[in-house]
Amino acid sequence: MNTIYFTPGPSHLFSTYQKHLMEAMNLQLGSIYHRSDAFKNIYRHTDEQLRILLDIPSTHAIFFASSATEIWEKIIFNCVDQYSFHLTNGAFSTKFYDVANALKKSPSQFAVDEGQGFNMNEIILPEETELICTTQNETSTGVQIPVEDLMMLKKKYPTKLLCTDLVSAAPYPAIDHTLMDCSFFSVQKAFGMPPGLGVWIANERCLDKANQLTHHGLNIGAHNTLESYFKNYETFETPSTPNVIAIYILGKIAEDMNNLGLANLRRELEVKADMIYDFAKHHKDFEPLVKVEAHRSKTVAVLHTDRPSAAIIAAVEQHHMRIGSGYGKDKASQIRIANFPATSIQQMEELLDVLNTL
């Protein structure tokens, strides 16, 4: 019997993944040249489907990398001379900040405790800030930044570049990309694919910044720079050989999601999220880590428990289901439940029934 993965990444594979993988094998896509017409058509199709699904305007280009972690580096290299500003409230938003430090920049941060959200009225940017770095969905703690708050931040600081990490959220949040200079995600979470592909969405304000940095003699990378990405994008090519099969499958899954309807996917995710948090509200052994409902992630629910999480996870596995532990120092006292499109309402009911009997 196959295991149902409610882990927050890698997570359960989307229902059509295997079909599209076999199509890619039959088409021998693992062997095609990345400057061939065949690859350009794959890139074009994936670009088209992601634009429909995520409502990405023509002002933004879509690029591919090996992971979201790699994209952290690219964003700091290409969009920051010295001063990035980071909203941090968990492990991954803090790692974005750490990348800026590792690249010898001078980042600043507005930090709140893990499990807490942000009050945008309290955020005051240093004047020299070049780039605002946010994590719309903090995978380690299950905290989301409401889309309206991101938009408020951009309207408050319209001349600053604004970036957000959508790694464990896309395609759920209704991001207004006209107000977002760049965003990114990886495919092993809500898109239901194995790891190995990151997607970077950026506008020409980011390119202008990269060109400015180059003009002033700064190192923005040797090959996969925004300049080379944008230049190759004009003909649906990539600076270096990409993960062709993953790009192909991503386009197909995005098309499947478009056919299902994003509104329908969102409604189902919201139903499942409500089920998880309602379960935790009424169960004596669990409680949501995030206390403010507006800040609770719809896609990664983190529940505190006084029972050892390893024992809970092991018991759930006996029923051919797998959930995640807490992250880092909270590994033993929390569980994380991924709520991605690949799992159904019925499967979520079955998981919660098992948890309820432990």
Image: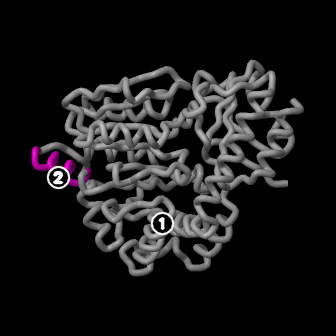
Q: Looking at the rendering, which quadrant does residue 131 occupy?
A: top left
Which residue lies under the disc numbered 2? 211
Q: Looking at the rendering, which quadrant does residue 161 occupy?
A: top left
| Picture quarter with the C terminus | top right
Residue at 35% from the left image edge and 70% from the top image edge? 237
Left/right placement of residue 207 relative to residue 246 reads left
Q: In this view, does 41 lie above or below 132?
A: below
Q: Which mark is residue 298?
A: none
Q: Is residue 30 above or below residue 194?
A: below
Q: Where is residue 164 in the image (x, y as percent from the top left)?
A: 41, 43
Callout 2 touching callout 1 (CB < 8 Å): no
Q: Residue furthest top?
A: 306
How crowded is the residue under tag 2: few (<14 C-alpha within 10 Å), some, or many (20+)? some
Residue at 39% from the left image edge and 30% from the top image edge? 120
Q: Position of residue 68 (x, y in %)?
A: 45, 47
Say what secondary structure mark 1 lies in: helix
Residue at 37% from the left image edge and 23% from the top image edge? 122
Q: Which residue lies furthest to the right in this view?
A: 357
Gap between marks 2 and 1, in whole Å? 29 Å
The one nearer the camera, 321 or 89, is 89
* Type of amino acid under label 1: Ile
Q: Position of residue 4 (x, y in %)?
A: 76, 49
Which contiguous range is marked in magenta? 206-216
Which residue lies under the disc numbered 1? 52
Left/right placement of residue 73 relative to residue 258 reads left
Judge depth for marks 2 and 1 and give the one in front: 1
The one nearer the camera, 30 or 18, is 18
